[in-house]
Amino acid sequence: AVAALEPGAALVVEDLDRGIADEKALFHLLNRARESKLSVLLTSRIPPGEQEFCVPDLRSRLRALPVVEVQPPDEALLKAVLVKLFADRQLAVEPPVIDYLSLRMERSMAAANRIVAAVDRLALATHRKLTRPLAAEALASLGESHE
């Protein structure tokens, strides 16, 4: 499969921390990707250097890779994501509602998606405008309000 990819293409291997069915295959994939000048992105909740692997060469190869830790979104990014998610649903939302939500929700993209979907459902079901009280109700229905 790697041989069929164009130079400069990218491969993604997700959830490395959940286990690898075939460590030798991953080792060979990484070697072929390097030979073919392909980019490889590995995702894991645990840095590769802290994980145990049966194949020693794979262990050393993974420990030699650069590691970047993705932090939860800061307040500005979370607000921008909320605005975009509401806009994607063609919902007009006032800045005070965004401020209210961003201060009371879990700081994650998954939470932003859940909350926007809940607000949208509640607004449709109750035929109400998107207001702070409606947003508070949606947060409470998800058990997400961190007041």
Image (spheres, rainbow, N blue to C red):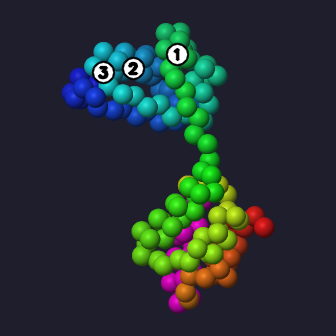
Between the C-alphas of marks 1 and 2, the distance is: 12 Å
Q: Secondary structure at mark 3?
A: loop
- Find residue 107 and report its image quarter: bottom right
Dots 3, 2 in contact, CB < 8 A: no
Disc 2 marks which residue? 30
- Find residue 50 and report its image quarter: top right
Expressed as whole percent of the image width and height from the top left, the position of residue 13 reads 43, 33
User: Residue sitting at 24 percent across and 29 percent down?
Assistant: 5
Closer to the eye: label 1 or 2: 1
- What's the residue type where badge 1 is placed? Ala
Is residue 116 inside the magenta stretch? yes
- What's the residue type where badge 3 is placed? Lys
Is residue 128 inside the magenta stretch? no
The span shown in magenta is: 110-127
Disc 1 marks which residue? 64
Q: Is residue 14 left or right of residue 36?
A: right
Expressed as whole percent of the image width and height from the top left, the position of residue 126 reads 56, 88
Disc 3 marks which residue? 37
Q: Residues within 10 Å of mark 1 (few under 14, many from 20)?
A: few
Between the C-alphas of marks 3 and 2, the distance is: 10 Å
- What's the residue type where badge 2 is placed? Leu
Q: Secondary structure at mark 1?
A: loop
Dots 1, 2 in contact, CB < 8 A: no
Res. 18 in view: no
Is residue 106 or residue 78 the one in the foreground? 78
